[in-house]
Amino acid sequence: MLTCTDIMHTNKQTSPLEPANILLALGSNCLYSRTIPLAREQLEQSFTNVRFTRCIVSEDVKNSDAPQYANCLCKAQTDLDKKVLIRLLKMIEGVCGNNPALREQGQVLMDIDLLMYNGEKYHLKDWERPYIKTLLSEL
């Protein structure tokens, strides 16, 4: 079985001169007092120059009747290419207990979205969310 450590040590960027600057959004709507610290620990072990914002609670953007989310941002550097980085983030979500069956029930133990990789923005709608704007000012 492939582990987070295996991914980190075997899939470096093709251009090793400069590490990639990344921005991640973390969110959880259940057990977040356990899952957010676990995700933070995994990210600290996986990347360099890691900085986190505080966590803030927000409403579910799709369903106001759903549980609230704890959200934070992570800024870091990595020598992984983007495709491999996304695989690693999915593995970290799994370490935190996230799985498709729970998601179908509306339980998101951990969601980690790549918002930026070396200046290129992703999840463009997320950038407009109030909690993202608030947390960005902390980095």
Image (cartoon, rainbow, N blue to C red):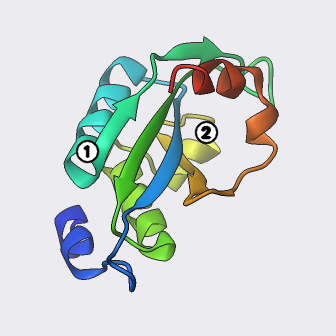
The structure residue drawn at horizontal position 37% and vertical position 53%, both measured from the top left corner, is: 77
**Place of residue 108 in the rendered image (x, y in percent of width and height, measured from the top left):** 53, 37
**Mark 2 residue element:** loop
**Mark 1 residue element:** helix
Residue 59 lies left or right of residue 10; in this view the side is: right
Asked if 117 appears above or below 103 in the picture, the reply is below
User: Most extreme residue toward the bottom, as rendered?
Assistant: 14
User: Most extreme residue toward the front, as rendered?
Assistant: 17
Q: Which residue is mark 1?
A: 42
The structure residue drawn at horizontal position 31% and vertical position 78%, both measured from the top left corner, is: 12
Asked if 132 appears above or below 74 in the picture, the reply is above
**Place of residue 105 in the rendered image (x, y in percent of width and height, measured from the top left):** 61, 39
Q: Which mark is residue 105?
A: 2
Residue 50 lies left or right of residue 138; in this view the side is: left
**Place of residue 47 in the rendered image (x, y in percent of width and height, measured from the top left):** 28, 52
Instruction: Give the residue type at disc 1.
Output: Gln
